[in-house]
Image (cartoon, rainbow, N blue to C red):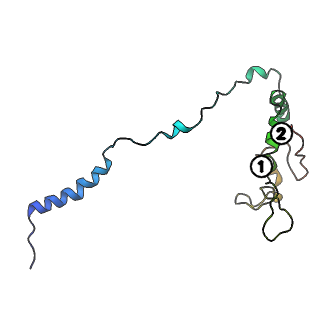
Amino acid sequence: MTAKRSPLALLILLFIALFIPLLSFIPRSDDKQDAWAYVPERLPHTDHSSLMTEPLSSGQDVTKKCLECHEDAAGQVMQSAHWTWTSPPVLLPGRTQSLVLGKKNAVNNFCIGIQSNWPACTSCHAGYGWVDATFDFSISEN
């Protein structure tokens, strides 16, 4: 025996199927906090164009000019992994000597490793004139 469905029951089911999901799109009061309120405000960038009066012909010349006022900047950069491409020495379990890890001696997913193509890998990274393993990391103008 089949039950006979009333038109009212069908209308109620149609209402539930169509209109109830639409309730999720009705705007609600925004109780969320603004994440940007927690970002520290930075000082505006200083326009250095008035300080650069003479022509600068190389990257090293630009760096030397910067270091005239920002004496500590070279030391700060030269201590970073961005400059050295290495980590501080790490003692790994099962080893007796520390190991230095980093982009300089690791296999990566971009171009496998830099040993096979120094000029291409070093052309975009910090260090002017870095083309092979003989690069002098102690020269602050680089």
- Among the 4 quarters of the image, the one containing residue 20: bottom left
Residue 6 versus residue 56: which sits nearer the camera?
A: 6
Counting from the top left corner in percent of width and height, residue 136 is at: 90, 46
User: Which numbered marker is on residue 75?
Assistant: 2
Residue 122 lies, with reference to residue 109, above or below; the image says above
**Residue beneath disc 1:** 81
Is residue 15 left or right of 43 when viewed as pictured?
left
Q: Give me the residue at 84% from left, 41% from top.
A: 128
Q: Amino acid at mark 1?
A: Ala
**Which of the marked residues, 2 or 1, is nearer the chain's N terminus?**
2
- Counting other residues with Cα less than 10 Å from the Cα at mark 1, is it few (<14), some (14-19), or many (20 or more)? few
Q: Give me the residue at 14% from left, 62% from top.
A: 10
Residue 30 lies, with reference to residue 95, above or below; the image says above
Residue 32 versus residue 84: which sits nearer the camera?
A: 32
Q: What's the distance in space between the residues labelled 2 and 1, CA to CA?
A: 12 Å
Residue 59 lies, with reference to residue 94, above or below; the image says above
Counting from the top left corner in percent of width and height, residue 94 is at: 80, 71
Q: Secondary structure at mark 2?
A: helix
Counting from the top left corner in percent of width and height, residue 131 is at: 86, 49
